Image (spheres, rainbow, N blue to C red):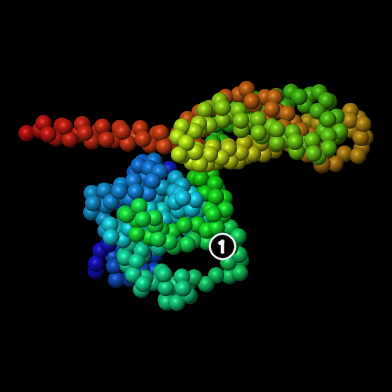
Amino acid sequence: MKEVTVGLIPAPELPEVIADNLADRLPRLLKKFIEADIDWKIEVVVDPLTGAAEHVSEILEEAKRLKERHQWTYAICLTDLPIYSDKDLVLADANAIAGVAQISLPAFGAMPMKKRVKRTIIQMVSELYYGGLEENPMKMAQRGIGPLAEQKKRGLFQVLMGIFYFSAIKRVAPPEELINVGVRFIIIPKLNGKLRVLMGMTYANRPWKIMPSFKSVVAIAFATGAYGLIFPTLWKLSVSYSLGRFIGLNAAAVLSMIIWIIFSHNLWEPVKDKSRKRLYWLYNTVTIATLGIAVLLYYAMLFCLFLVAVSLYVPPSLYGSETGIGDNIDIWNYLKLAWLVTSVATIAGAIGAGLENGELVRNVTYGYRQQCRYERMEREAKEREEQEERWAKEP
């Protein structure tokens, strides 16, 4: 039986996790969807350049280099950086002659990303294996014919989700200057592509992983809010405030926290190169979205703590007499009090606190991660040079 080895070259972090999770399942899927009479092998090699290079040519050149070094049949890079072609968002590129391809994970949007990456890897292997020939069974299935067409039938819900969320993927010829790219897949329409890349990059940042850094902030904010609950001022305000004031105070607390984290940890990416202005804008927007999700999770956790506290330690009779509402107390009053205390505690107590793990917080930005990857590449190149020098000196 003929053996074909496919090398997956993910960038560190999320691409690496996805590649490792798919490595065991891909051989069976490639047998099913591409060629059953082949012994498919999958190897995973993590490469920081895959997540640091911002141009397709660099990524494919790195794939070609690793393919030759490891003697793979094909090589596919998984990057967590967005790839643009003019104003189009690129999902994937393939060069059947060189046997290499690249997949840009942010183009997939948010969850469920792994399932869509799996399908795209199969498509890329198909492009490389069949060399773009018309009898490619994957392309036949797209036209509704062939043995795979039946497996592509979906229910109404999946079709609607594909139209309104996942958007369409278009197979196009690459620009003439990209001589090392044979086929390209882009996201259409362009507006969907922009929203999709924002969601994909935010998901790649994994904002929930920042939560351990909020332990000291939660402690200080809870202490501040608990002290404020001793006095009836917050009780009276919770009864007097309208819903609009609660929402405004909530928004002010969340925005204040986001702005403080950005500037205290130098997370804002200044525009150093005007030709890459769009990329810097995208990085900063994703940083705001990532921190926004993390802060909202923190706010929700703090709200739950205060809801338990006011339920246990604020007697209904005293609450009613101090606020003037008497016995007309219900759960909504306690929810409003906990909501108000959470916002006040976030603004007054948490802004001055320092997050415990600044390194973890800075790691949510693409610019910082790229800097770390470049430093890692420099160390690895230096180690290779030193190793070669030692080998040269050996008799």
Q: Residue at x 28, y 51 (%)?
A: 64
Q: Which residue is mark 1?
A: 162
Residue 237 placement: quadrant: top right
Q: Nearer the viewer, residue 135 or 316?
A: 135
Residue 375 placement: quadrant: top left
Instruction: Where is residue 119? Give x, y as percent.
Output: 44, 61
115 left or right, relative to 136: right
Q: Nearer the viewer, residue 278 or 17?
A: 278
Number of marks present in the image shown: 1
Q: Nearer the viewer, residue 43 or 205?
A: 205
Instruction: Where is residue 321? Give x, y as percent.
Output: 91, 30
Q: Residue at x 24, y 69 (%)?
A: 1
41 left or right, relative to 343: left
Residue 38 in view in this figure: yes
Quarter containing the C terminus:
top left
359 left or right, relative to 296: left
343 left or right, relative to 121: right
Residue 159 placement: quadrant: bottom right
* Outermost residue, left side: 395
Q: Nearer the viewer, residue 174 or 381?
A: 174
Instruction: Where is residue 277? Give x, y as percent.
Output: 49, 38
- Mark 1 residue crowding within 10 angstroms, few (<14) / some (14–19) / many (20+): few
323 in relation to 28, above or below: above
Query: SS class of the residue under badge 1?
Result: helix
Q: Residue at x 40, y 60 (%)?
A: 173
Residue 24 in view in this figure: no
Q: Hey, what amino acid is under mark 1?
A: Gly
Instruction: Where is residue 92? Give x, y as percent.
Output: 42, 55
* Outermost residue, front side: 176
Q: Residue at x 85, y 41 (%)?
A: 330
